Amino acid sequence: MPALKVPRREAEPVKRRLKSLGLYDGKRRPRREGGYVLLPVISDPRIEGLGYEVLPAELPLRPERQIYRNLESVLAERLSEEELKHLRRYDIIGDIAVIQIPPELEHRVEDIVWGLRKVHPFLRVIARKGFHEGAFRIRDYSIIWGERRLNTVHKENGVEIKVDLSKAFFNPRMKGERYRLAQLVRDGERILIPFAGVLPYALVIARYKRVKITAVELNREAYELGRENIELNRKKLKGEIEFIHGDVFEVLPELPTYDRVISPTPRGVDALALTLSKAEGWLHYYDFVHEADIEAFRERIIEECERQGKDCKVKIKKVSDFKPHVFKVCADVKVVD
Ligand code: SAH
């Protein structure tokens, strides 16, 4: 991803200029390098004409909105220090806040609702969450304040995503990951996305790249929402999305191979051999792995590549912490030939 190499003294004015030209990439952070600053810019022909060196740079993604701190400081008025320690991270999805409330804070539900509303006055629903259940990965929620609904429209990476948390899986924390993938994709690619849910990956990629995506989802309600999402974003999408309702294990064997396969695999499902067999260039395979087993996970992928007669390079990236020592990881598998 490109960066502009700018002398430190000039960094601030150049950053302002880039912002006003719409060329600054606010999703990544600038980095100092000697007497220079590397400013993150988007891929655009205009960046070459600014009089500064353009170079590829791995700049860190900004953390997800740091709203958690805010809630903590607002609640410091009402909760003890001990209680504050038990406060969990929460998510904002459209106008819905979802938070996990541990037993230690059971008596503080009212205060937490008050704090969330103070930090986010636009909220219409506050729900507490349980865990993902069953094959469709739907969580169990109970509404603790506001309108009795779990459907909303969430904005992310320049697209609008209709979700219904009572009917289909959606995770706003994967925003950075979707952005990363959209940056890796090149115009013209043909992409397969099994386990596609309400289509967040497909929409974000098609928003930015002229690609042909085939997505597959089994949950009828997620599929219906996904169809609505294609319509909702139709005018903004550069790419095309074909959406198939069905079981990945039945549908994929009938499909051709693709330049890139992105598998947001549900926990406990093994789709490695199947998804790899459909990948000509790249496979991005998500899984949940204990940190002690990451090497074994890599070995397993390399073995599967060998079994399929593919020469592969595998890079494994921790995407988020799922529970202590267990991470959601993404294996970026490059099929060399
Ligand atoms: N990619 C989406 C959803 C990931 S969750 C997102 O990131 O938001 C995994 C999804 O796989 C769920 O929507 C679930 O309904 C779906 N799923 C589970 N088993 C499936 C199968 N055998 N075939 C197709 N979809 C399946």
Image: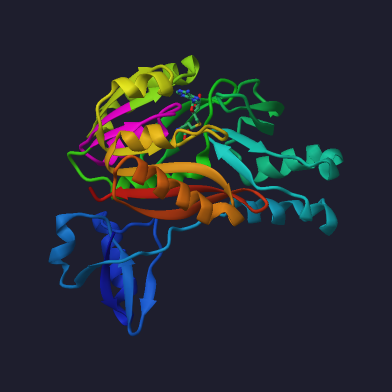
Quarter of the image for residue 232 reads top left
Residue 39's spot in the image, x, y percent? 32, 67
Q: Where residue 295 appears, x then y in whole percent?
A: 51, 56
The one of 294 and 264 positioned closer to us in this rendering: 294
The correct choice, above or below, for 146 with respect to 273 in the image is above
Residue at 75% across, 40% down: 101
Instruction: Look at the image and tell me whether residue 176 can be seen.
Output: no
In the rendered image, residue 199 lying in the magenta stretch gets the answer yes
Give the vertical position of 111 relative to 72 (above or below): above
Where does residue 100 sit, x and y in percent of width and height?
Answer: 71, 39
Q: In the rendered image of this protein, does residue 256 appear above or below residue 315?
A: above
Q: Colour scheme in the image?
A: rainbow
Q: Residue furthest bottom?
A: 35
Q: Name the quadrant containing residue 11.
A: bottom left
Q: Is residue 179 left or right of residue 292?
A: left
Picture residue at 67% right of the left edge, 44% below the top: 118
For the point 43% across and 16% down, the residue is: 224
Count of marks placed on residues: 0
Is 311 magenta? The answer is: no
333 or 97: nearer the viewer: 333
From the viewer's perspective, is 103 left or right of 71?
right
Quadrant of the rendering where the N terminus is positioned: bottom left
Position in image of residue 32 (x %, y %): 38, 77
Using residue 253 as the reference point, say whether residue 93 is left or right of it. right
Viewer-proximal residue among 57 and 337: 337
First to last magenta residue range: 190-214
Q: For the point 38% across and 64% down, which residue is it?
A: 59
